[in-house]
Image (cartoon, rainbow, N blue to C red):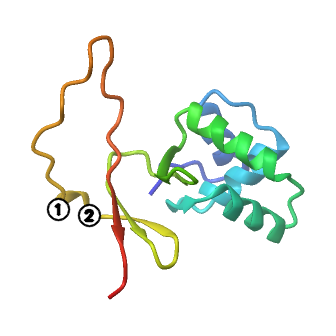
Amino acid sequence: MNDLTVQDPDARLVSWLASGGLRPTRQRLALAALLVGDGEDRHVTAEGLYAAAAGAAEKVSLATVYNTLRAFCDAGLMNEVVVDGSRSYFDTRLDDHPHFYWEDSGRLTDAPASQLKIAELPAAPEGAEIARVDVVIRLKRV
């Protein structure tokens, strides 16, 4: 669960944006409310967030949704999880954890981190350091 402890929802969202150094524009506040307004963690695609915004009668373009998600990621408020070259999910949970990708439904869910054991990673090339390791376990129904 996200650490959004301020009681007033608007103040909570402004605080969340400020923690990433972002100004609270109308579009950012509207999308932040859909992403973290209830304090629950979620995985969204840009298209899914765009549809949710339209359903909430928020006037934002798909390009604005993409740009805002990118700004949230760059500010450290979310992580992008790339499932394949054409599909990205945006995760509001910031700790290191693996994911299940359900191929039949196209959903991304958290996998139990306590059951994942990575024994060793290759050394980063000279002049580089490992920033993050994403583990996506692809599932299909049998």
Badge 1 crowding class, 10 Å Cα cut-off, few under 14, some 14 to 19, many 20 or more, is few
Element type at marker 1? Answer: helix
User: Image quadrant of residue 111?
Assistant: bottom left
Residue for point 80% across, 53% down = 62
Residue tagged by mark 2?
Answer: 112
Query: Is 125 placed above or below 110 here?
Result: above
Q: Nearer the viewer, residue 19 or 133?
A: 133
Element type at marker 2? Answer: loop
User: Image quadrant of residue 99?
Assistant: bottom left
Where does residue 103 sit, x and y in percent of width and height? Answer: 45, 73
Tell me which amino acid carries mark 2.
Pro
Residue for point 54% across, 40% down = 77
Please identify the quadrant where the N terminus is shown.
bottom left
Taking the image as shown, residue 92 lies to the left or right of residue 52, namely left
Residue tagged by mark 1?
Answer: 115
Q: Nearer the viewer, residue 55 or 132?
A: 132
Q: Nearer the viewer, residue 12 or 104?
A: 104
